[in-house]
Amino acid sequence: MPLQKPWRDLTRETVAAAPDRPGIYELGDGSGTVLAVDHGVLRDELKTALAYNDGDRVRWTETHTMAQARDLAAEHRERLE
């Protein structure tokens, strides 16, 4: 099941608006196909994704802890396989 959040264009403005907290994120292409699911401190992770042009769009969900983010990301990755 995809994250129940709207897609946002992966831009500098989006990265600047991302929380500086742990979470899970999905990177997608222009048509909304999920390319990757990962976790970490959201703003830091999205800075890297933008620098490496890893996707066109992004959506995320914050979590309370890094462990919670890791577990949730693992669940979401399973559905992509």
Image (cartoon, grey):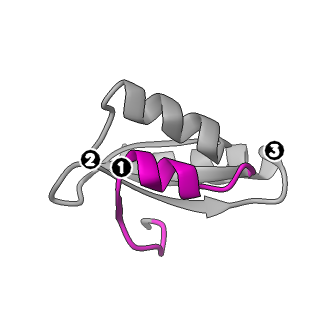
* Placement of the C terminus among the 4 image quadrants: top left
Which residue corresponds to mark 2?
Answer: 56
Q: Position of residue 14 (x, y in %)?
A: 45, 55
Q: Position of residue 5 (x, y in %)?
A: 46, 73
Q: Quadrant of residue 66?
A: top right
Label 3 Cα neighbours within 10 Å, binned few <14 / some 14-19 / many ≥20: some
Front-lying residue, 81 or 52: 52
On the image, which quarter does residue 51 sit in?
A: top left
Specify start and end residues of the magenta stretch as a single range.
3-21
Q: Nearer the viewer, mark 1 or mark 3?
A: 1
Disc 1 from disc 3: Cα separation: 25 Å
Nearest the viewer among 20 and 37 is 20
Which tag, 1 or 2, sits closer to the chain's start?
A: 1
The answer to whether residue 30 is left or right of residue 77 is: left
Residue drawn at (78%, 52%) of the image: 68
Residue type at the position of mark 3: Ala
Dot 2: element: loop
Which secondary structure lies at badge 3? helix
Q: Which residue is mark 3?
A: 67
Q: Earlier in the sequence, mark 1 or mark 3?
A: 1
Q: Are marks 1 and 2 in contact (CB under 8 Å)?
A: yes
Question: Which class describes the residues within 10 Å of circle 1: few (<14), some (14-19), or many (20+)?
Answer: many
Q: Is residue 44 magenta?
A: no
In front: mark 3 or mark 2?
Answer: 2
Residue 73, how many percent across, how many down?
59, 48
Identify the residue under disc 1: 10
Is residue 79 among the parts visible in the rendering? yes
The percent coordinates of residue 7 (x first, y second) are: 36, 66
Amino acid type of the residue tagged 1 in the rendering: Leu
